[in-house]
Amino acid sequence: NGPYDVHAVQEKWQRIWAEKDPFRAGGEDDTRPRKYVLAMFPYPSGDLHMGHAENYLYSDIVARFWRHRGYNVLNPIGWDSFGLPAENAAIKRGVEPRGWTYGNIAQQRSSMQQYGVSFDWSRVLHTSDPEYYRWNQWLFQRLYEKGLAYRKDALVNWDPVDQTVLANEQVLPDGTSERSGAVVVKKKLTQWFFRITEYADRLLDDLNQLEGFWPHKVLQMQRNWIGRSVGADIDFEIEGRADKITVFSTRPDTLYGATFMVVAPDSDLAAELVASASPEARMRFQDYLDTVQKTSEIDRQTADRPKTGVFLERYAVNPVTGERLPIWAADYVLAGYGHGAVMAVPAHDQRDLDFARAFDLPVKVVVDTTAPVTGAIPVIELDAEGVPIDPGAPGIDEIDPAKTGVALTGDGRMMNSGPLDGLSKRNAIARAIEQLEAAGTGRAAKTYRLRDWLISRQRYWGTPIPMVHTADGRIVPVPDEQLPVELPAMEGLDLTPKGSSPLGAATGWVETVDPETGAPALRDPDTMDTFVDSSWYFLRFLSPGDTTKAFSSKDADRWGPVDFYIGGVEHAILHLLYARFITKALFDMGLVEFTEPFSHLINQGMVILDGAKMSKSKGNLVLFQDELNAHGADALRVALAFAGPVEDDKDWSDVSTTGAAKFLARAWRIAHEVTSAPDVVWAEGDQALRRVTHRLWADAPALIEQTKFNVVVARLMELVNATRKTIDGPAGAGDPAVREAAEAIAMVLDLFAPHTAEEMWEQLGYEPFVGLATWRQADPTLLVEESVTAVVQIDGKVRGTLTVPARISADELEALARADEKVVRSLVGREIARVVVRAPKVVSFTTA
Ligand code: ANZ
């Protein structure tokens, strides 16, 4: 019964787990129901940090819990090992991305093992292994066959000094490069895209079925990102141009109020329209375009920016009024949204109004927003002379937007709109679309904020795009049997970004043959966005080592979708959206039977220090490995689990690893004392302690399912304290209730502190592993609450008694008293003036 040696216990069990591999998921013959638990896999840049400590702890708690509940649990781990940090490290330190990456993986893997996470280590994957990225290439080919992978020109951020493509995050708010300080310009490159927009409606609509299972905030972020707008496409004749210009509008009802048209200055359309304008206008336009190209999209969408623009000296024709509408270029219209052109309705759109007022363009009101659209006809009171007493809201003339500067965006009755006059907004939109469709000048339409997924990267450390460019300009897929197209060795390649892929310089690699004709051809030198790798990795875990396919549909149907997925909120949009898209595409190919990959999603909070986010640059990092070395895995795990609700940020300065270590030593000592105590022949045991034990058996499952892990730790602490009290009482550690409690502690503690739990379990005389032991059923007779007698008084006299639960609330007690037969009889014909309730003992009625 010496002191508790944390590190010896930890090493002992880690050795045994490594030998016996108890947490490997059951195979096909395993008849238990299945659960798939997954924590977002790590990026191997450096050692694990405290965010990982949380992520892998929480998923492990759930995995261990489900094993205790009789499930066949899959809890795999892998590494998201392609990507920029490895490449940047390579450029900075002249090391191989490969060596750097796999060195970090080895380090992280060892930390995870020291942390006691119950992973199935037989399924480890690294996305930078050819046996993994081969299937990225396979996926690319399947999407290409379906028309879901295609190439087009796209504008990228270009740093003209560094000759580098920049990610959006690398462009500072003032439009300069974070790297060189140069003004960033847009450059056109031909790139590969995945056609995620084809799935926009399904990606949006299916979010509804995740309500209640994903954080509401994440669902909302996904909805906004997809950003579906419903309205109409309207075609406008253009003077001196054969083709019409189509605009998207959510308010086709306001078409009679359109007084000018605005196109995005950086669109092809603007360039074409201005080409026939006067030399002065062309120059003004060119100057304006130069400024616009330095402005970020975010700034352009800011509502209260002063409006700027250039008249293109061209006119459109309003299809319903026949009026000539001047065409302007202005930066509040974005080239990449809708059709990059709008009909401007200044009376009813604030940005259009600001623009009209800045450039003195006409404002025409077509919705009377003072007219009621719903409910009864308003009653107007008249005075003795028949004059209305209260003129009510101002008339439409008093709120003329041209004067007030405030656009009328609300609902109302249409006016100045011919056949639409008198209709409400909703009816007018429907009617306007009918008219446009009948006239062939417009149609109902939807627009999305969501853009197609640009997957080309001009980088080395990624999956090569498995396509070949032939001398005669064809693009040919590399046949499946020739996959993987392996990355060439880095030797001799210059990885500094140049706007074209470094793989283009790997002559021996890039030069290949046309798979169809055998003629000389070139490989596509780009690599894939690493979000492709992580869009389907959860499926690869199900068929590890399968060299014939990416995953087997049978395995996917047995295990999928993921029952519990956990990770940081930074992945709320892109990773989850891409994984959802790929899952739906695979569903359409008949390869999986489900349309959503993750049934239940949790975002853990951050670990912060003294209220601040930890970062290397601020020098306020708490290092995972240091904490592990100092306190051991179990104390770290318990302290984190106890620190607060899963979703909340946890301030490390409030987290007590020493408190956790003391608690673990107390728990461990109980198991010791139980086995060294003389047997007490006392069948009953301490009933109060038994009640605490069985309440934990009964309550913990729901608490774990609701991820209230901190509450379960608190309940465990309560049980350890109660057990200690009984041990120190007359019966001592030989009381059978103490053994029962010690076994409960071991099993529930396994979720949080698995090494200590295994040690206790062994001490209590059981074979390993407590991690695989079955959860015990609570004895219902021990869950019955204690009851007490409450008295009911009427005007100071006791009129009845009630047997009620000791924890009854005042309201419940009063309700029971009022319903009691004797009380009801005594109150006949009398009125209660006052009630005083003191739960659980007294209810006192005073009558009038
Ligand atoms: C006429 C109109 C009248 C409009 C009115 C609004 C109010 P959401 O809801 O964000 O989809 N629009 C269309 N394409 C645009 C582009 N490329 N850049 C900037 N604005 C664009 O907004 C749709 C509305 O934004 C469209 O409806 C259009 O203006 C404008 F009283 O058309 B609306």
Image (tube, rainbow, N blue to C red):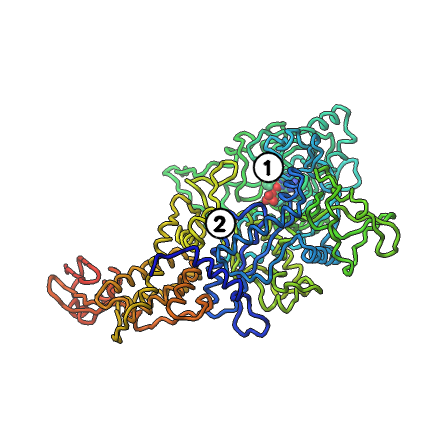
Can I make out residue 436 in this image? no
In the picture, the quarter occupied by the C terminus is bottom left
Q: Which residue is mark 1?
A: 298
Q: Earlier in the sequence, mark 2 or mark 1?
A: 1
Q: In which of the image's four quarters is ligand 1 placed? A: top right
Q: Position of residue 654 (x, y in %)?
A: 38, 45
- Residue toward you, 5 or 447: 5
Q: Residue at x 45, y 68 (%)?
A: 768
Q: Which amino acid type is shown beneath numbered disc 1?
A: Ile
Camera-side residue: 655 or 583? Answer: 655
In front: 77, or 254? 77
The answer to whether the residue labelled 2 contacts the one labelled 1, judged by CB atoms less than 8 Å apart, is: no
Q: Amino acid at mark 2?
A: Thr
Q: In the image, which disc is placed on residue 374?
A: 2
Left or right, 16 with reference to 514: left
| As drawn, 80 above or below 21 | above
Instruction: Name the one closer to the observer, 120 or 707.
Output: 120
Q: Is residue 333 left or right of residue 757?
A: right
Image coordinates for residue 441, horizontal then vertical, percent = 72, 47
